[in-house]
Structures are given as structure tokens and as C-alpha cells.
Image: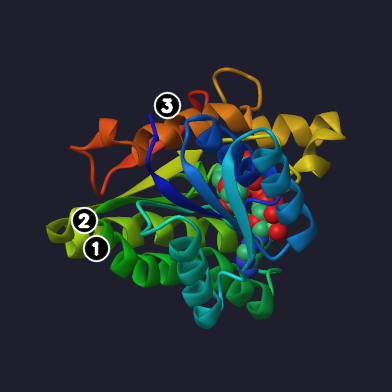
Amino acid sequence: MLAEKIAIITGAGKGMGEIHAREFAAQHAAVVLTDVDTKNGHRVADEISASGGKAIFVDHDVVDEGSWSNVVAEAERAFGCVNVLVNNAGIFIRDTIENLSVVDFRRLYEVNVTGAFLGCKLVAPSMKRAGGGSIVNVSSVSGIVANMPGMTGYSATKGAIRMLTKAAAVDLWQHGIRVNSIHPGTIRTPLNEDYFSDPEKTRLILGSTLMARPGECSEVSAALIFLASDGSSYMTGSELVVDGGMTAV
Ligand SMILES: NC(=O)c1ccc[n+]([C@@H]2O[C@H](COP(=O)([O-])OP(=O)(O)OC[C@H]3O[C@@H](n4cnc5c(N)ncnc54)[C@H](O)[C@@H]3O)[C@@H](O)[C@H]2O)c1
């Protein structure tokens, strides 16, 4: 589904980003993995290359504008103009509105929102040169509902990503660039691993998930591949929920 596509995936050193990179490569995309975690980023890119896929790793902090320019330059040098961007990198800090510090709120906003904004802004010129492209911003069910305590900062950033996506879609459609958001529910990754060591916390994080289990990273990758591919050619500014039915109730 992704043959001939050149895709940047941020935060690809571990968690969902790692699996997305592996699944994109399995679909014959050339993948540019980026992360602040250089050790894991190199490991994943090397493993994809060793198994016959096309992948490079670029050291990258999504909050740094200059670092984004370097990612685009490295992607074009290695493979050509960029067709797909997955703004996946994100951080999670959980605290109630009274306890969350302004420092933590600003950090959440910087990585989760400014990072995605810079990605849309700085990768769009390469996509224009490619004749169009698909940007997928990774939001969350927390960008749609507030269904457990302590999510103020994180939910605010994920809601902002949802609207950043729609506004960017309006700005970029004339250039053949589609922009959509994806909203995973509870997916077991290093980001929330501590919730699965304690049955009480597991019950809390699964909340109202109809399927009563966490999702697999690959279940999100499948939806992401659809949004990245030409199969979703009539979708822009839309939001795709992958949550085991959590937001249905
Ligand atoms: N795990 C879930 O249940 C869940 C649910 C909904 C949405 N999400 C979102 O999915 C995305 C991936 O989450 P995950 O669970 O795989 O997280 P994770 O913590 O397992 O992985 C996130 C990756 O992003 C990288 N990263 C963090 N800050 C960065 C920065 N400034 N620049 C570049 N890379 C950076 C980390 O090094 C890490 O490799 C995040 O945006 C997260 O908010 C996760």
C-alpha cells in the first residue's frame, strides 16, 4: 500500500512509533525514523535495513526548528521528496489541574503541539515538491473526551492537535497535501507501562473500553497506513478513532 512513498515518522525509537516504522517498511515505504532517543532509533532503523527494508535514522528533537530542517534535508538526500509525515512523538505527564505545574504544562504543549506544528510547517515544502502528500497527526481519545482524572495538560495538547490538523488541512489542500488526525485509545507502550503493573491502575486506564483490553501498536499502524496511503484520498481534516469502543459509550 505504501510502495514508492517516502515517510518521516517522529518518535520512532520505541513504542508505537517503532511499530509504525516496521509496518511502513513492510509495506515498502522508505522510512525516515526520528527520535531524541538515538540509541533505540539507530537500533530500529538498522534492524529494518538488515531485513531488507529501506530506513535511516535522524537524531531529532521535534521542538527544535533547525532540527526539523535537518530531517527534511536528510530524507531528501537519502530517498527524495517526502510524501508522508507521521507526527507521532509525544510525552505524557499526568496530574490534576490543581497540581500540574506550569513548567510541566508548557513542556507538554511544546513537545505535543509545537512539535506537530513545526512538522506540518517544515515538511509541507518538501511535499509540495513531491506533488502532494499525507500528514497524520497523532492525537488521542484524550483529544475528544476527558474520561479520567489527571489528564488536564495532556488532554489540552491532544485537543489542540485535533484542531491544528483541521486548520492545516484547510491551508494545505490546494497543494495536494491531506492532513488527518488519529486518536488511539489505550495502547500498551513504554509511555503507560506503569499502569499495567497494578490491577487497580489497569482498571482505571482501560476505563470504559468496550473491548476490555489494551490495543496493540500494530492495530494503530493499520489505521495509520490507510491514512498515509492513497486509499484515503478523499479524507482530509478528519479524525480516525482507534480505541476498542472507548468513546462509543
Ligand atoms: N500509549 C497510548 O495509550 C497512547 C494513546 C493515545 C495516544 N498516544 C500517543 O501516541 C504517541 C506515541 O506514544 P507511545 O505510547 O508510543 O509513547 P512512547 O513514550 O512509548 O514513545 C514516544 C517516543 O517519542 C520520543 N520523543 C519524546 N519526546 C520527543 C521529542 N521532543 N522529539 C523527538 N522524539 C521524542 C520518545 O523518545 C519515544 O521514543 C504519542 O503522541 C502519544 O501521546 C499514546
From the image, tell me which residue sits under label 1.
128
Q: Quadrant of residue 216?
A: top right
Residue located at (86% from left, 34% from top):
198
Mark 2–mark 3 distance (CA, rounded to whole Å): 37 Å
From the image, tell me which residue sits under label 3.
248
N-terminal-most mark, 1 or 3 = 1
Mark 1–mark 3 distance (CA, rounded to whole Å): 37 Å
Q: Mark 1: is the Cβ under 8 angstroms from ligand 1?
A: no
From the image, tell me which residue sits under label 2.
131
Residue type highlighted by circle 2:
Gly
Quadrant showing the C terminus:
top left
Picture mark count: 3
Residue type highlighted by circle 1:
Lys
Percent coordinates x, y for residue 180 in the rendering = 33, 47
Quick one: SS at disc 2?
Answer: loop
Asked whether the viewer can see residue 207, the reply is: no
User: In the picture provided, is 204 more to the left or to the right than 135?
Assistant: right
Residue that lies at the very extreme toward the right in this rendered image: 197
